[in-house]
Image: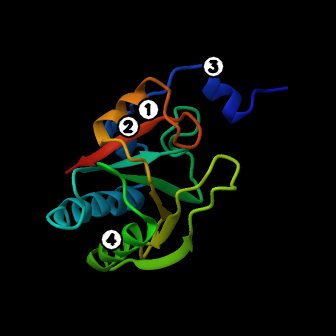
Amino acid sequence: MSESYFDQKKSRPVSDVPKDVFLNSLSTVDRENIEAVIAAFESLDSGVWKNGALMAVGKSVAEETRGIPRKDIDLLILEDGGTDFQTFLSRARALVETLHFTLGDITYPDLHYDYGHDGSVKIKPPSGTLVDLLSSISTSSVDETLLRMREKTSSLLMPHDFCILARI
């Protein structure tokens, strides 16, 4: 019997995947969509997001599954000191408006979920893979959160590979 994805994750260190490695693993249309999200995130930095980071996480980044088509691409937004979900949602809407993408399903935070869930917003580009913007209500600084992720001590869902796409 082969190891599950999560068993494989426990048996090797978390990886901080270089941005070019992640982007080059995507299809052309998905790479263009993610690059547009990065540009929009960076353009909205003044007054929208305080010190923060946009990161790719999940199976689209993981070494075992990178480059395999997925149902969505998970992008985590971190901010120093965290934010409440309604603030995240209004910021996500501003991002979608800037991109001219379509707002999709909204998943509100659920503390009873297996690992907790800080909420997310699905955004639909005109073509390509759906993007799932994930909220984090971590009250730590972005730098502290990244350090814990690198040390595999983060409380964000499961230990996972990640790729820092933008810092503001």
Q: Which residue is disc 1 drawn over?
A: 149
For residue 11, the mark is: 3
Say whether disc 2 or disc 3 marks the residue closer to the N-terminus.
3
Q: Are marks 2 and 3 in contact (CB under 8 Å)?
A: no
Q: Which residue is disc 4 drawn over?
A: 91
Say whether disc 1 or disc 4 marks the residue closer to the N-terminus.
4
- Crowding at label 3, few (<14), some or many (≥20) Cα neighbours within 10 Å? few
Which amino acid, by three-letter code, is at mark 1? Met
For residue 145, the mark is: 2
Q: How many marks?
A: 4
How far is mark 3 from mark 4, CA to CA?
Answer: 37 Å
Q: Secondary structure at mark 1?
A: helix
Residue located at (42% from left, 52% from top): 76
Q: Is residue 129 visible?
A: no
Q: Nearer the viewer, residue 128 or 18?
A: 18
How far is mark 4 from mark 2, CA to CA?
Answer: 21 Å
The location of residue 14, given as percent across then percent down, is 49, 26
- 166 vs 21, left or right, is left
Q: Nearer the viewer, mark 3 or mark 1?
A: 1
Which amino acid, by three-letter code, is at mark 4? Arg
Residue located at (22% from left, 61% from top): 39
Which colour scheme appears in the figure? rainbow
Say whether disc 4 or disc 2 marks the residue closer to the N-terminus.
4
Say whether disc 3 or disc 1 marks the residue closer to the N-terminus.
3
The location of residue 49, given as percent across then percent down, is 24, 61
Q: Secondary structure at mark 4?
A: helix
Q: Nearer the viewer, residue 138 or 78?
A: 138
Q: Height in image: 11 above or below 130?
A: above
Which amino acid, by three-letter code, is at mark 2? Thr
